[in-house]
Image (cartoon, grey):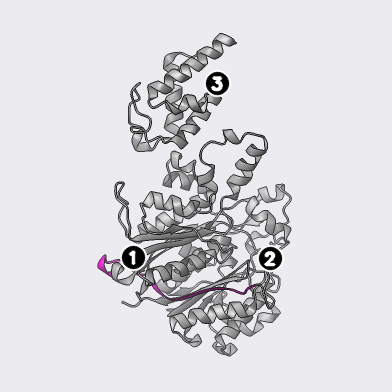
Amino acid sequence: MRRVVITGLGVLSPIGHGLREFEEGLREGRSGIRYEPELESLGFGCCVAGIPCGLDDLAAQYFAPHVQIGMDRYATMGCIAGLDCWADAGLPEPAKDRVDWDTSIIFGSGIGGIETIGKTLVPETDKRRARRLGSTIPERIMGSAVSARLAGILGVGGQVTSNSSACATGTEAIANAWWMVREGRAARVIAGGCEGASPYIWAGFDAMRVLSSRFNDTPSRASRPMSASAAGFVPAGGGGALMLEDLDAASQRGARIYAEIVGAAVNCGGHRNGGTMTAANAEGARRCIRGAMESAKIRADEIDLISGHLTATAADPIEAANWRAALDLPGERFPLINAPKSLFGHTLGAAGAIESVACAVQLYRGFVHPSINCEDVHPELRWCDRSIPRTVIERDLEIVAKASFGFGDVNACIVFRRWKN
Amino acid sequence: METTTDSLIAMLEKHIAKFTAPERRDVVLTPTTHLVDELGIDSARMIDIVLDVEDTFNITMSDEEIDSKRTFGDLLELVRSKIQTKGATA
């Protein structure tokens, strides 16, 4: 089996675009959550969100007008991250007359092109104007829009696909990419996830009453994973991309290596034993975490940091309990655990990817970002209070575990190891 | 709306440019400029250009009429004849 390393990163997030800004935001514990008047005008309970700034201007820098007309904003976000990742990996400008058969793309989304569906496709069709829609609807709304667009820009000729597993999408993309490179089916894979920033994406969650609606006046305090006053997740959009590459291929071209991915696991809890469409089967989550550790051949006490899924819902204590059970470590030896969603909210299909970029950055640069808005730790999490960093910690990390747990009772877990040359 | 040939050409050029890659926009449009081979406009984007042109000039062009149009000159003549027909029946 081949070793798989991370040679490029790309991120467009509510706390910044690009690695420098993103890292600054992580270190500072910057909140990317803002009041969004459109949500209030639509009668949402949650009127705050995490939306990357300046998307329209950014899109104009990346894509010519004749390309943008064929892109929903979710794919725009994903492609920006994907293109940044390619450039960050030090790969050459794609040739217009050649296909790169050695590279694949697994880049997914949870909800996809619903903004185009809601604003254009449905209204025009209902007005009997389907024949006036123009030619761009399929390429904007198809489930594979983002991966297909990225492949076209980069000339990628390996497998090009978009996975979808709700909030586990980004992490699952990375796991699938890891297996692909390990098995020699691709020299490198752009693995990522993206999600748009539209009321149409978020309305259903607001209707479920799972969004944070008590902090509309103090947006930076609204996303509160592991807090006693957590009141639901804060919706957000963005894109994250990682270049997973065969170590030999990376070494041959002198690529910079951020980290190594040494283990992964993906499973589903089967909606049994307490698992439902919206809640995890604890056994499934624990098996996933243990499966990732086993595939990485690591012991639980070797994990320095857990990057949690931790959404600021009632599931947080359950998730922490699952980590505790899976690692089977006494409280004082439990690793550090932080919640990236405390900074930039829940980017749904992008979450696992953006948060994995954060994992790689923390490993590469030797720090642990704070978990903000947790000054009042949840009573059921007092056992791990000392493991939650409230300010940045400068420390070399060896092993970071990232997990995502999605609607559908689906789980994904990745194990990263610091790269030592 | 009275439309001179020059203004008609300018409007069509603008609609076509919207769906053309930047590197192709330097192509000088002549009656024989091939829409696919020289401007990279595939059948899908042709639909978008036709819709824009129809809305601008308040005309209708059928799928059959469009299918046979290969050059800028072909498109120009079709649009001109539609405008003239509309003017004659107004």
Classify mark 2: residues with Cα within 10 Å, few (<14), some (14-19) or many (20+). Answer: many
Give the spatial CA distance, label 1 vs label 2.
Answer: 41 Å
Residue A253 in sight from this viewpoint:
yes
x%, y% of residue B54? 53, 25
User: On the rendered structure, is A278 left or right of A297?
Assistant: right
Give the spatial CA distance, label 3 vs label 1.
Answer: 53 Å
x%, y% of residue B37? 34, 33
- Circle 2: element type: loop
- Circle 3: element type: loop
The residue nearer to you, when weighing A45 against A282, is A282
Query: Magenta stretch containing residue A256, yes or no?
Result: yes
Query: Magenta stretch containing residue A209, yes or no?
Result: no
Label for residue A187? 1
Residue lying at the far top of the rendered structure: B88
Q: Residue at x 58, y 45 (%)?
A: A116
Residue type, label 2? Gly
Look at the image and tell me in which quarter the N terminus of chain A lies: bottom left
x%, y% of residue A401? 50, 76
**Front tag of 1 and 2:** 1
Q: Are marks 2 and 3 on the same chain?
A: no
Relative to A137, does residue A80 appear above or below in the rendering?
A: below
Residue type, label 3? Ile
Classify mark 1: residues with Cα within 10 Å, few (<14), some (14-19) or many (20+). Answer: many
Chain letter for mark 1: A
Q: Residue at x 45, y 72 (%)?
A: A362
Q: Which residues are magenta?
A: A251-270
Q: Which residue is mark 2?
A: A232
User: On the rendered structure, is A11 left or right of A31?
Assistant: left
Q: Residue at x 46, y 68 (%)?
A: A176
Give the spatial CA distance, label 2 vs label 3.
Answer: 53 Å
Residue lying at the far left of the rendered structure: A252
Q: Which residue is mark 3?
A: B59
